[in-house]
Image (cartoon, coloured by chain):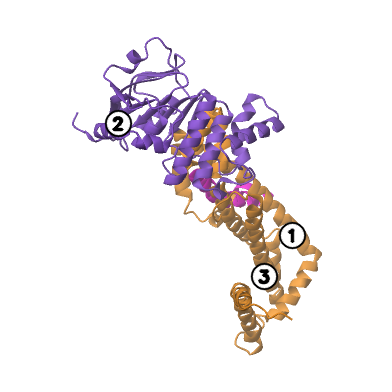
Chain colours: A orange, B purple
Amino acid sequence: MTRPDRSAIRAAIRAVAALAAGVAAPAAGVAALLLAWELAPRLGLVRAASVPPFSRVFAEAGTVLADPAFRAEVGGSALRWALGFAAALGIGVPLGLVMARSRFVRHAVEPVLTMSYPVPKVALILILVLLFGIGTLARVIIVVLACLIPIVISSFHGADAVEPRLIWSARGLGTSRLGTLFRVVLPAALPSVLSGVRLAIGVSIFALMAAELMIRQSGVGAYLFTYYDLGDSPRVWATAALIATAGFLLDAAYVRGVKFGLRWLAGEI
Amino acid sequence: MAEVGQTHTTTASASLAGRVPKLQAEDVGKVFTRRGRDPVPALRSVDLAARPGEFVSILGPSGCGKSTFLYIAAGFVAASHGVVRYDGVPVRRPGPERGVVFQEFALFPWKTVLGNVTYGLARLGLGRADRADRARHYLEMVNLGGVEKLYPKELSGGMKQRVALARTLATDPDVLLMDEPFGALDAQTRAVLQVELTGIWQRTRKTVLFVTHSVEEAIYLSDRIYVFSPRPARVRAVIDVELDRPRDRERMLADPGYPLLHRRIWDLLRDDTS
């Protein structure tokens, strides 16, 4: 039997330590939080009726996922979110790119954008209901409004910062002036656009949930509110936890997908 | 071969009597104007000519406007007065017959090496396979093999500039316009690429207009050097470099005429009074 090399052992120890720091430490943090959640109601530190222990909520989440009513609401919410998100992309990206290349469009759009930036879009929900009724449209529009600003601003900044020599290179290689918009400005602005889209994913889920909680016709938010009215706190917690998890997974999947799909990207998105 | 260097006092066009220049600039000036700011003169009046197949350098102090002149010749920037003619026709816009290479490489980061080099080939009506073959041919010409699937961020500076050169050569331009192409590279890479550029130029016999602020680089590469004054630039002197070709750097540096020529150009660059 050969004696293992000392440096190999040291490397193995370092690898284990790195694994511990990278995986074990975050896991320990989450475990501590969940343990506190479990023990606080059981030890009587908080009212168990309002804050059910983690194990109870976890079990309830399984029941919620199996509930056909919940599944139907998820389908409806996802559809409204996708419609609003697609519309915001279709409007926001071209608008941002054209703003960067046309002084006139920029001057026309910038004041509207600046004024609407600090407006909490959620405050407009009831006005949209007055305008469009409680149907799908009002909720889709709130998603569009919530997404539009991060998407337009990131597309504008991305396109505005395109290195002029990239455009010149393309022109020198025979691309027409209009052609550079699609073949150079759009791909060059893409890293910035993709960061804006990531922000938009977060705020749009927030806006849709807020709209559903207020309008209370249908959707995951309405499902949540129904059980709140019934005083079923484990189900309220379980549903809220599932919404939070869905948002987290959507963001993680987006980041992974972009990194996998676009190997040329240099920095973070 | 000590007879290096001859200063013309006559204008460029007069020294070229009898031959049609590939590229000719007449009284080209540029003043940058921006609302709310004083106009900035960049070029006063530049006369310049390059015969077909000639290697011509523009040498000048940093910020003297020599890049601006190149951008006017490329059609990226409009002249305030005067005209640049390509084959006798005034330049108004960029065109693939005048290929440009930038100091900052200006590669498309979202395209692979092969994608960058094939970029300009679609409009030539070549099929996909032909485009790739042609791109590989030019990548070999710049001594860059085996990296075609990499992205620009995965390349060193020297490799990036080789890709940029291959991308420009692939569309087979008549004229190469080079804006301090080796300025961002380390000295060793720079020397290697100078040798390779000379070889490519001698094989393809393209007309080259080469902007640099390195006296040695200008002497080593050029048939003729236009020395620009500080901003707003005009042509201070036109110098023929009559060193034999193919040139060898060691022999050039050992030539008794070389330090004299270097010194004379250096003095022209430093002299701000005229």
Q: Are marks 1 and 3 in contact (CB under 8 Å)?
A: no
Instruction: Look at the image and tell me whether residue A177 can be seen.
Output: yes
Crowdedness near tag 3: few (<14), some (14–19) or many (≥20) residues, C-alpha within 10 Å: some
| Three-letter amino acid code at the position of disc 3 | Ala
Quarter of the figure with residue A64 = bottom right
Q: Which residue is mark 3?
A: A241
Query: Circle 3 — which element?
Result: helix
Give the Cα separation between the discs numbered 2 and 3: 79 Å
Of badges 1 and 3, nearer the viewer stands 3
Quarter of the figure with residue A75 = bottom right
Q: Chain of mark 3?
A: A
Q: Chain of mark 1?
A: A
Give the Cα separation between the discs numbered 2 and 1: 83 Å
**Which label was assigned to residue A73?**
1
Q: Which residue is mark 2?
A: B261
Crowdedness near tag 1: few (<14), some (14–19) or many (≥20) residues, C-alpha within 10 Å: some
Question: Share a chain, discs 2 and 3?
Answer: no
| Three-letter amino acid code at the position of disc 1 | Glu
| Three-letter amino acid code at the position of disc 2 | Leu
Q: Find the magenta span and give its range.
A: A131-158
**Residue at 41 percent of width and 27 percent of height:** B244
Crowdedness near tag 2: few (<14), some (14–19) or many (≥20) residues, C-alpha within 10 Å: many
Query: Circle 1 — which element?
Result: helix
Query: Circle 2 — which element?
Result: helix
Work out whether residue A196 or residue A218 is closer to the camera in this orientation and state it.
Answer: A196
Q: Position of residue A214 (x, y in %)?
A: 62, 60
Q: Are marks 2 and 1 in contact (CB under 8 Å)?
A: no
